[in-house]
Image (cartoon, rainbow, N blue to C red):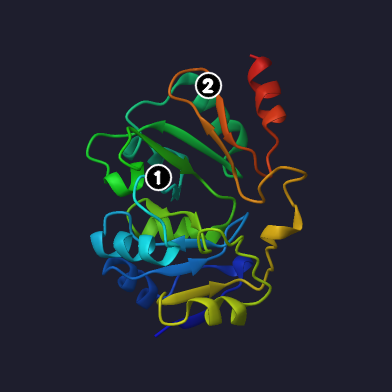
Amino acid sequence: MTRLVRLDADRVAYLPQEVVASLKDGGMAIYPTDTLYGLGVDPRSEEGLSRLFAIKRREGGRPIPLLLSETEDVERFARHVPEEAARLMARFWPGALTLVLPAEPGMHPAITGGGDTVGLRVPDHPIPRALARALSGAITGTSANRSGNPGDWGSAEEVVREFTGEVDWVLWDGKVRRAAAGEGGPGRSAGSTVVRLTDDRPVLLREGVLPFREIIEFLEKG
């Protein structure tokens, strides 16, 4: 059964404990972020990760980003944080920048895509950060859509109809996020900008609402 919970993002003092307990037990929730709606499971849950891959209709080998509660949580998931990555965190977090960093040994291969890196972000939205905090630091942050579908949701009811019986919770903050509206500009995603930084050389993997040019200009200032 899919349950809808309406939340006021400006007044999130706590999350329903039923939601947190469900996620810890392999449940799945759709939740708002500062960019698109996310599809969240506990990254430590085998059952949750299996359900996420099934609902996204995607094969293994594609990594799943994690949303964090606080910048300090990065050290729990990244083996190494290059100096330039630390600068970007201080400047653009919380915000729409996902940093792909060397992963801690033992990270679940579903999260890393079988590689040795992990995508991390601290969103500028209280709900995913509260979820991450309740789940010991992180929640999966892939967008709430099917593979090949932009996830262009106009109402809570649309999300419930699409995912009814597949997700356990839809957390709705009343704000419409139009993935297909070109928020990121021509040729850019309406999601976060994804940059790989395994050393001090940034590599753009996806340009989103944060222009890559702005990132490079900041780094060049020294």
Residue for point 27% across, 42% down: 107
Position of residue 105 in the picture relative to residue 74 (left or right): left
Q: Position of residue 116 (x, y in %)?
A: 32, 32
Camera sees residue 6: no
Q: Position of residue 63 (x, y in %)?
A: 40, 45
Camera sees residue 48: yes
**SS for dot 1:** loop
Q: Is residue 3 above or below residue 39?
A: below
Residue for point 45% across, 70% down: 15
16 or 192: nearer the viewer: 192
111 or 73: nearer the viewer: 111
Task: State yes or no: discs 1 and 2 in contact (Cβ < 8 Å).
Answer: no
Disc on res. 112: none
Query: Label 1: which residue?
Result: 63
Query: Label 2: which residue?
Result: 84
Residue for point 41% across, 67% down: 55
Q: Position of residue 54 (x, y in %)?
A: 36, 65
**SS for dot 2:** helix
Q: Position of residue 144 (x, y in %)?
A: 52, 63
Position of residue 158 in the picture relative to residue 13 (left or right): right
The N terminus is located in which quarter?
A: bottom left
Residue for point 41% across, 49% down: 64
Position of residue 63 in the picture relative to residue 47 (left or right): right
Give the crowd class for mark 1: few <14, some 14-19, many >=20 residues within 10 Å.
some
Residue type, label 2:
Glu
Residue type, label 1:
Pro
